Image (tube, coloured by chain):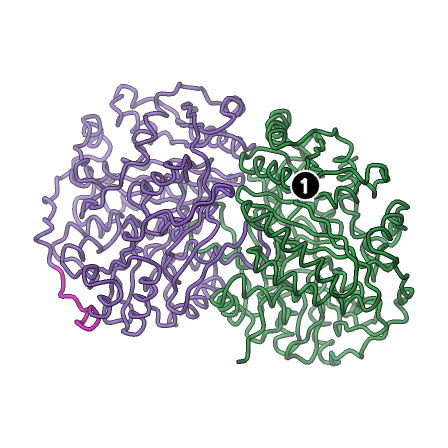
Chain colours: A purple, B green
Amino acid sequence: MSRDEDRAAADPSMRWNGWGDPAKAKDLPLAVRTLLPLLLGRIRKPQPAVELADVRVEESRATADDLAAFAVAVGADHVDVSPEARIRHAGGRSTPDLLRRREIAQATPDAVIRPADHAEVAACLAISGERGIAVIPFGGGTSVVGALDPERGAHHAVVSLDLRRMTGLLGFDEISGEAVLAAGTSGPEAESLLAARGYELGHYPQSFRYATIGGFAAARSSGQNSAGNGRFDAMVTGIRVATPTGDIELGRSPGSAAGPDLIRVFLGSEGIFGVITEVRVRVHPVPRDRVFESWSFPDFTSGADGLRRVAQHGGGPTVIRLSDEAETAVSLAQVGKIGRALAKGASVVTVYEGEGIAERRARTSALLAAAGGTSSGEGAAEEWLHGRFDGPYLRDSLLDAGVFCETLETATTWANLQHLRTAVEETLKSGFADAGAKSYVMCHVSHIYPTGASLYFTVLAGIRADPLGVWEPVKARVNDAIIAAGGTISHHHAVGRDHAAWLGQEIGDTGVRILRAIKRELDPHGILNPGAVIPEERTV
Amino acid sequence: MSRDEDRAAADPSMRWNGWGDPAKAKDLPLAVRTLLPLLLGRIRKPQPAVELADVRVEESRATADDLAAFAVAVGADHVDVSPEARIRHAGGRSTPDLLRRREIAQATPDAVIRPADHAEVAACLAISGERGIAVIPFGGGTSVVGALDPERGAHHAVVSLDLRRMTGLLGFDEISGEAVLAAGTSGPEAESLLAARGYELGHYPQSFRYATIGGFAAARSSGQNSAGNGRFDAMVTGIRVATPTGDIELGRSPGSAAGPDLIRVFLGSEGIFGVITEVRVRVHPVPRDRVFESWSFPDFTSGADGLRRVAQHGGGPTVIRLSDEAETAVSLAQVGKIGRALAKGASVVTVYEGEGIAERRARTSALLAAAGGTSSGEGAAEEWLHGRFDGPYLRDSLLDAGVFCETLETATTWANLQHLRTAVEETLKSGFADAGAKSYVMCHVSHIYPTGASLYFTVLAGIRADPLGVWEPVKARVNDAIIAAGGTISHHHAVGRDHAAWLGQEIGDTGVRILRAIKRELDPHGILNPGAVIPEERTV
């Protein structure tokens, strides 16, 4: 496993109706094909997916004057109303997004605008504000929460503001260990630029190969180096943002008490307050060594207890993740070890990078063993690392085979972890059962904190017809269950439009009023990402 | 040195016109008395300080109806208009505050109100909003940035909302390592409550013995365990706030991406948006071991390079601080080692607590030695720890002796550290020189981050007359210099009223607009802490 794989250039043209590089799409492994009917019953193969050229889009509602104004700002070459460009910017990569991409008629933005720099972004916002055009900021296009839906709000048109021309290392301070990256720089591009200087960012969410630095910041992304350099918000030391009513640059110094930390107003704002154009991040020298170790636990509960001990002790592995019994069984099947697919128990993957690996590993091993874990060598951990960006490809193959597959996630305190996990799992199962579909629910913990952890669920279901219609009420029930069981509505997928209706229950009316007040001040015409994040006003 | 000292009960009646426990006030050490004339020239002993009973206060502007309304909310015993209570709530503990406490006529709040719990705080805010009364939230009274000035704003009266009846451990989750503390709980009270369960918070700012949990949160305090559990904002996992227009509870889970982290809107808000009534914090088992080691460096520059290596490597000491040449010389004199007062060089104190001390110490020692440091045993570090809360007592003695003494602080990136330090030091020296006063400027680094560090300055000056009048323009020039040299206007003292005029240069017009928008939404009548944090609107 080479580090170079982390820095492979992103494929600029992600598959328009699925994940990633079309060349990497693959058939389902034999073992999975064998397992699926056992888990989900008989599955009907769906209609073949629609071809891009056959998709019907509405005529663009952007007027000739609108387009001319944008052309003045960014150049005529970077104002695109072609059906292909509009379809490619029609949404993100949630399963509902991908199901919509299989339909013959699709809602799209009215144009795709590609600014080259901060000033052009600011100019586009000014034009949009004057002309009454909604703007959907677009980075890598990997949102799975509906943040990229082409919603017009109260405006006559909506444009996708594609930031991927804005790439590059704009500043580098080796003494302070900081780099300034243009917001449209993709994960692999950023790591390549930094690696040339011997540094890395070390942020590896599953969307890494496509997602952008600005997107990581706007959505409070969380990487797979979950115990190392996990959360992107903790790496950000400064940002530059263009809002419809003025620019802002934040992050004068580490460790400030100069009023509230306003960087945090923009991290997680998902394009509703402004467009993040530059991000200053903490970087560190590329670690030399990498060590893998896998562990087996009798069950999820003992495994979670082991992870808690590691998190609360500190100074442990760079990556640690725990798969529950259901995920452990399928993962083993997936990598071809069908004979072990019925193995009982929960598995833990650990990866160590950087300094002091021997000490950290010895300490972590003692803690995991004390919780009931048994070391099972390095194989599974290395396999996990190798395939860690490939999950979404497998989903495409499942959808092609007629199997519904989606993921969702939350987080809570250690004390509440089992309660929340059970609540979500039971809601998923009963939701699908009520719709007459068999389902299979897997769960893992990918991110640990001293006070709690994330829970990431993957659900497979054998839905006979109308998967979108079946899923939407199940998803709503799961969101209700997460809130009722004390979880957060998102650990790292963010809010988008899909979770907005639940955010008010998490942050309360006063919290929603704070978001609305900032929105009114910075974006008084409401042109930015209408309908995202902030719950709709209730009309009583 | 016993840990019990950390948990000594706070003295409920801090010296009304100085720092801390009147019984601990002491004369200047002989060595310091010897040094002062050498550094500052001949010093004239000032008039003896005024007695509390002789201070003249204005008649309270709170009406009988106002007081009756508060009495309904909190009980008549907890509405206090006595001159003593009002004078004790007239300000914080900056040097200008203490100089004002030496005057015969003093501005005070019109009443002191002491609510018992969240509901009573909310009731007081409702009464104040209805009746047009400004409210200054008051915790330990240790602000050094004018956050407690009894400013009425546009209102007919101003009350000090003293939160110190609100103490206690309201919740404790040992599994998740979280405790909920009432906002008025003092540092020592919190540590006592947690120690009874084998836990600690580990937050030790210099104000520790008096300051409150709510104050730590509201001002983004930073403790002396600067490389361990340093910044209070990083320990906070949840808050409860009463605002004039509704309550808010935040912090459902660690690691959330449910929109912007609104906890950060209140951390650093210094009572302008609402009153923090409860704080949930991460706690950890009391560490068993503690090891001290001091280091000598040829100069501040090499010492700072050593600290940078330690910060960027990670996993170092719990406390690390570097005193520049001037502070090193005086510190040695202070502890009676006058013979070493002329020693050259800069000194570093390190303290290790918790797990893996031997490894962490070995690693840190190698990094400090590589930067030019020489270990000088444990003595000085242990002495520092012993006296770490006593600095403010020394200031009182200096003021009594007619020596002006004040501190100020900032932070920046490692690359900019020397530039900023020089800019501040030169501005202080030339500022006093222009006023005909000799000065002595000392600097230390007390908080390190991977990307930068704090700078903390102590200045002594021999001002012949009107110390307040001399200091104010010097302080203004220093603030200008900090902004011009790229520093933050405060690393941990916060903004208050003293730094508000500079905040706009740090966060820009758009940043100020965000603060104003939140303020308008939560506190539409502007009753909370008028004039603090947010710069005044400029009337063009």
Nearer to us in this view, B416 or B135: B416
Say above or below: B378 vs A192: above
Seen from the viewer's position, the closer of residues A277 and B59 is A277
Query: Residue A138 location in percent, x, y?
Result: 29, 55
Image vertical order of residue A183 relative to residue B202, above or below:
below
Tell me where residue A540 sits by quadrant: bottom left
Residue occupying image coordinates x 64% and y 42%: B226
A60 within the magenta span: yes
Whether A36 is drawn above or below A419: the answer is above
Q: How many marks do you count on the picture?
A: 1
- The amino acid type of the residue labelled 1 equals Leu
Viewer can see residue A429:
no
Task: State the residue at coordinates (85%, 75%).
Answer: B56
Q: Is residue A222 magenta?
A: no
Residue B10 lies, in percent from the top left, at: 78, 50
Q: Give the magenta-colored segment's residue range.
A: A57-67
Percent x, y of residue B397: 86, 54
Which residue is nearer to you in this view: A336 or A120?
A120
| Residue shown at the point (52%, 72%) measured from the top left | B520
Q: Which residue is mark 1?
A: B322
